[in-house]
């Protein structure tokens, strides 16, 4: 099943509600841009590549919603307003804005609302189809890097649920397993929203790939005991100096470096953002309740404040290789800024 797709029969967007996993498997069907924006903010739909697809379909939904505007100018203004609403839902993942802009550009070239909707939908569907192909390409390149028998640590969820299917970091693992390698996965639970225990463990277990969940704070200990052969994570944005991924990734990279364990980042080429330095990237800050409560259970005293960044920046000096659909880029990453193809092609 696809994480996110267009429902042609009902002319609406359909995606898995990831806030309900693993207990319930519920699909959201919506024609509302506001509903989608809220769902993205609450991480019903999440993960960088899936956000690119969601953003693209969000623009298509907007075109559908505003079919009856009196003028083409009014139609375009309304779609641009919706695109801005979607764009600000999650500021760190580059793919969200990338997907929105790509479909918006296509739609705004059209002369009528009707043709704009058709073109927007086609473009969003192209992004969805491309994502599947890209993940398999990333998997093929990255799977070859893993030893025949190994234990891989991953953080957050960079799997099928973060994409359309297959995944980036988990795509690397799936492709290696498909080639007959014996890969066992250590999934960091990924506090505070537990994408590692709720989502990564869910999808790997469903596929029959051995997976064990650890507290985030156990990663260094396992590395010290020789229990981890490689780290593979996804990315929300890659700048010329850093990889942005789920908070805690930087900590794993430092530990992996200390223990001489390869640290790989798997991401589509569209996650690269060579236009800015890491320090200029906005890090999403999330609400107090994510730390203050576990369900209904209160975890900290009233009125105590929190710091809850959703992402951190891992310097490229700590990254052994970046696995993309255009090949593998390696430290010191000169090719990243000078060429759009890596060295595995
Ligand atoms: O806050 P999330 O769950 O959207 O964060 C997701 C991650 O950090 C993933 O590792 C990243 O988006 C890569 S997904 C292929």
Image (cartoon, rainbow, N blue to C red):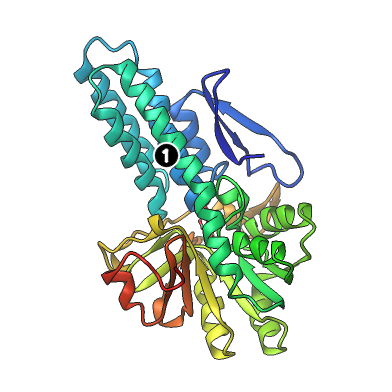
Residue 193 is left or right of residue 326, and the answer is right
Q: Is residue 68 above or below residue 319?
A: above
Residues packed near mark 1 inside 10 Å, few (<14), some (14 to 19) or many (20 plus): many
What residue sits right under mark 1 in the picture?
A: 55
Q: Is residue 35 above or below residue 269?
A: above
* Residue at the (62%, 40%) spot, across then down: 2
Quadrant for the N terminus, please. top right
Residue 108 shows in this picture: yes
Depth check, front residue: 151 or 135: 135
Residue 190 is left or right of residue 95, and the answer is right
* Residue at the (42%, 69%) spot, across then down: 243
Occupied quadrant, residue 269: bottom left
* Residue at the (44%, 29%) spot, across then down: 34
Numbered label tally: 1
Quadrant for the C terminus, please. bottom left
* Residue at the (56%, 82%) spot, across then down: 262
Instruction: Classify mark 1 as within 8 Å of ligand 1 or not, answering yes or no.
Output: no
Q: Is residue 219 above or below residue 7?
A: below
Depth check, front residue: 11 or 79: 11
Depth check, front residue: 338 or 344: 344
x and y percentages locating residue 233 in the rendered image? 55, 67
Occupied quadrant, residue 106: top left
Q: Is residue 312 above or below residue 118?
A: below
x and y percentages locating residue 12 in the rendered image? 52, 23
x and y percentages locating residue 161 in the rendered image? 61, 48
Residue 191 shows in this picture: no
Furthest-front residue in view? 345
x and y percentages locating residue 7 in the rendered image? 56, 25
Residue 211 is left or right of residue 117, and the answer is right
Element assignment for label 1: helix
Depth check, front residue: 307 or 142: 142
């Amino acid at each position: 099943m696809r994480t996110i797709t267009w429902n042609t029969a009902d002319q609406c967007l359909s995606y898995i509600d990831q806030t309900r996993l693993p207990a319930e498997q519920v699909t959201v069907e919506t024609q509302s841009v506001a509903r989608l924006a809220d769902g993205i903010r609450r991480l019903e739909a999440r993960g960088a590549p899936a956000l690119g697809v969601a953003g693209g379909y969000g623009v298509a939904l907007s075109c559908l919603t505003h079919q009856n505007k009196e003028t083409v100018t009014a139609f375009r203004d309304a779609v641009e307003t919706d695109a801005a609403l979607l764009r600000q839902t999650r500021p760190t993942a580059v793919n969200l804005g990338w997907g929105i802009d790509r479909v918006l550009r296509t739609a705004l070239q059209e002369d009528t609302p009707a043709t704009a909707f058709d073109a927007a939908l086609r473009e969003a569907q192209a992004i969805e189809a491309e994502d599947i192909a890209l993940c398999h390409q990333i998997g093929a390149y990255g799977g070859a890097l893993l030893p025949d028998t190994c234990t891989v640590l991953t953080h957050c969820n960079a799997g099928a649920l973060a994409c359309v299917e297959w995944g980036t970091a988990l795509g690397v693992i799936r492709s290696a397993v498909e080639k007959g390698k014996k890969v066992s996965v250590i999934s960091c639970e990924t506090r505070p929203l537990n994408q590692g225990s709720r989502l990564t463990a869910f999808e790997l277990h469903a596929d029959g790939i051995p997976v064990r969940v650890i507290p985030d704070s156990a990663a260094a200990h396992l590395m010290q005991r020789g229990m981890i052969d490689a780290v593979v994570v996804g990315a929300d944005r890659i700048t010329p100096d850093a990889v942005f991924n789920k908070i805690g990734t930087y900590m794993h990279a430092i530990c992996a470096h200390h223990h001489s364990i390869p640290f790989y980042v798997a991401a589509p080429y569209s996650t690269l953002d060579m236009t800015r330095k890491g320090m200029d990237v906005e890090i999403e800050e999330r609400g107090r309740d994510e730390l203050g409560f576990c369900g209904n259970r209160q975890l900290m005293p009233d009125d105590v404040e929190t710091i809850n960044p959703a992402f951190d920046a891992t310097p490229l000096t700590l990254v052994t290789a970046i696995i993309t659909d255009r090949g593998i880029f390696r430290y010191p990453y000169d090719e990243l800024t000078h060429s759009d193809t890596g060295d595995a092609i």
